[in-house]
Image (tube, helix red, strand yellow):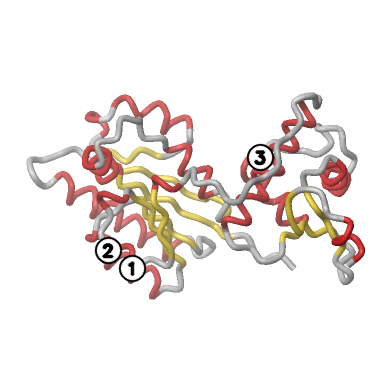
Amino acid sequence: MPEAERALAVLIDFENLALGLKKGKRNKKFDVQKILERLVEKGKIIAKKAYADWTSYEEYKKTFHEAAIELMEIPKRGMVGKNSADIRLAVDAIDLCYSKEHIDTFVIVSGDSDFSPLVSKLKENGKHVIGLGMKESSSNLLINNCDEFIYYEDLERPVGIPPKIGKDLAKRKKDAFQLLIDSVVALVRENKEILWSSMIKQTMKRKKPSFSEQYHGYRTFSELLEDAEKSGLLRLKTDPKSNTYIVIGFGKESDEGRRA
């Protein structure tokens, strides 16, 4: 059966990310929404904080507020501003570690090697630690110490080739199918061995909390999956023990596969 949902705390060292953008000479503006969309595939985000001298990054404040990220103001004081942000992030992480026992996963959005001792302490307390940073500015020390590390540049890397959704479908059905496919892709990216229907619906709800199969014209989630299979988007099988659907692949099943 599906594993328990992870509870995440996301702590963003924005000064480090801004440095990474400059190092990589990237012309694109930093997109925090891409990070959050990737992380909801990991579990439910409980806490979101970002640390910086925000007077230097006014253009990002509105986007971060809209994403419900708490902005932690760390005014620069000569050369000590950066260390002040690091210390505040580390203190908040340890506080959450001890005061919010239900948070089992910490996401440190930074490539700074200074956070390696923090990662070790969180792991020592039984927490799963994910690092996320820029390729050009992420320390190997931090990368190797995290349980897993995600590069910002890889956030849009596709997994497999999901089928295309017909353009002639009604908008509500098209939207439902797109969210369904995106959620299956997310679970494949997470190396989930069995794609239970309940797990897929849970991921869809994390990606879009307002999702309801009834809104899209289906009485049950199983009906939505069956319609997606009829449309050639997914292949299903029924688990004999729970009598619930499992997604076993994209696209139509071959005649040989049906006979197997």
* Residue holding disc 1: 144
Q: Amino acid at mark 2?
A: Asn
Identify the secondary structure beneath mark 2: helix
The earlier-in-sequence mark between 3 and 2 is 2
Q: Amino acid at mark 1?
A: Asn
* Residue holding disc 3: 209
Q: Amino acid at mark 3?
A: Pro
Dividing the picture into quadrants, the one containing residue 150 is bottom left
Q: Is 57 displayed left or right of 202 in the figure? A: left
Q: Tell me which residue sits at (71%, 52%) in the image.
A: 200
Is the residue 29 above or below the residue 113 in the image? Answer: above
Image quadrant in which the N terminus is located: bottom right
* Residue holding disc 2: 140
Mark 1–mark 3 CB contact (< 8 Å): no
Q: Residues within 10 Å of mark 1 (few under 14, many from 20)?
A: few
Q: Is 87 displayed left or right of 108 in the figure? A: left
Image quadrant in which the C terminus is located: bottom right
Mark 1–mark 2 CB contact (< 8 Å): yes
Residue at the outermost front position:
256
Q: Tell me which residue sits at (71%, 43%) in the image.
A: 180
Q: Which mark is residue 175?
A: none
Residue 58, image x and y in percent?
29, 26
Depth order, front residue of 57/172:
172
Residue at the outermost bottom position:
124
Q: Tell me which residue sits at (35%, 47%) in the image.
A: 12
Q: Is 250 displayed left or right of 69 in the figure? A: right
Dividing the picture into quadrants, the one containing residue 210 is top right
Is the residue 54 above or below the residue 135 in the image? Answer: above
Mark 3–mark 2 CB contact (< 8 Å): no
Disc number lying in front (1 or 3): 1
